Amino acid sequence: MSAPGIGGPQVERRLRPPRNTLDPRAVAWWRTRVLLWTLVPVVPLAVPGALVAPARTWLLVPAAALAVLGVLGAAFLPVWWFRVHRWEVTDEAVYVRTGFFRQEWRIAPMSRIQTVDTVRGPLEQLFRLSTVIVTTASAKGAVHIAGLDHRPAAELAERLTRIAQATPGDAT
């Protein structure tokens, strides 16, 4: 369906979910991150709670509650995140969708790409994963595709760089 607009007719397109999922190892990577972040408040509560008898109840009860929440979060949240995170690259743009309750769709036109980076933190290296960061001329910030196998991530970064170099820049 065409609609007249400034600069000529426009083609109406429906936004569809991006097609690609992350590497399944992203679930284990996210689980590990949740468990490590759970340790941050649990250890400082549990250690003195175990050593100081008068404060034992006041420290161990919150430590146990936080530990249970962390374990439950590690069990369920990464699977959920894996189901909702999607990405896709076309010759025109990079598409990323995240979130369930608060969904965020990011579309970065190739003409707006400034840099493409591949990042591998220590945990990502352990799980052989990478994050591709696409920096654009946007106030919203970079587009992140986290949880990709490190080899396809490097290939994606090369592909994005080639497409962005071949795409004329945005004059706006």
Image (cartoon, rainbow, N blue to C red):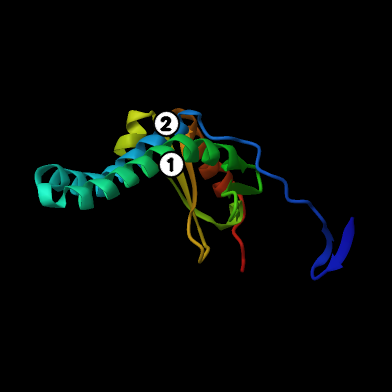
Residue 145 shows which numbered tag? none
Write down the residue under mark 1: 73
Q: Position of residue 125 (x, y in %)?
A: 33, 32
- Residue 80 appears left or right of 74: right
Label 1 neighbourhood size at 10 Å, few (<14), some (14-19), many (20+)? Answer: some
Which sits earlier in the primary sequence, circle 2 or circle 1? Answer: 2
Mark 2 or mark 1, whichever is nearer to me? 1
Q: Position of residue 74 (x, y in %)?
A: 42, 38
Q: Residue at x 34, y 39 (%)?
A: 35
The tally of labels here is 2
- Give whichever of 89, 80 is nearer the camera: 80
- Position of the N terminus, as image quadrant, is bottom right
- Give whichever of 72, 11 is nearer the camera: 72
State yes or no: discs 2 and 1 in contact (Cβ < 8 Å): no
| Secondary structure state at the residue bearing disc 2 | helix
Q: Residue at x 33, y 46 (%)?
A: 66
Q: Farthest residue in the bottom direction?
A: 6
Write down the residue under mark 2: 28
Query: Is residue 10 among the parts visible in the rendering?
Result: yes
- Residue 13 appears left or right of 133: right
- Give whichever of 19, 160 is nearer the camera: 19
Q: Residue at x 40, y 36 (%)?
A: 31
Q: Position of residue 85 (x, y in %)?
A: 56, 42
- Residue 18 appears left or right of 73: right
Task: Tell me if residue 49 comes above or below residue 159 in the rendering.
Answer: below
- Residue 66 appears left or right of 27: left
- Give whichever of 45, 141 is nearer the camera: 45
The CA distance from mark 2 to mark 1 is: 12 Å
- The amino acid beneath tag 2 is Ala
Query: Is residue 149 among the parts visible in the rendering?
Result: no
| Secondary structure state at the residue bearing disc 1 | helix
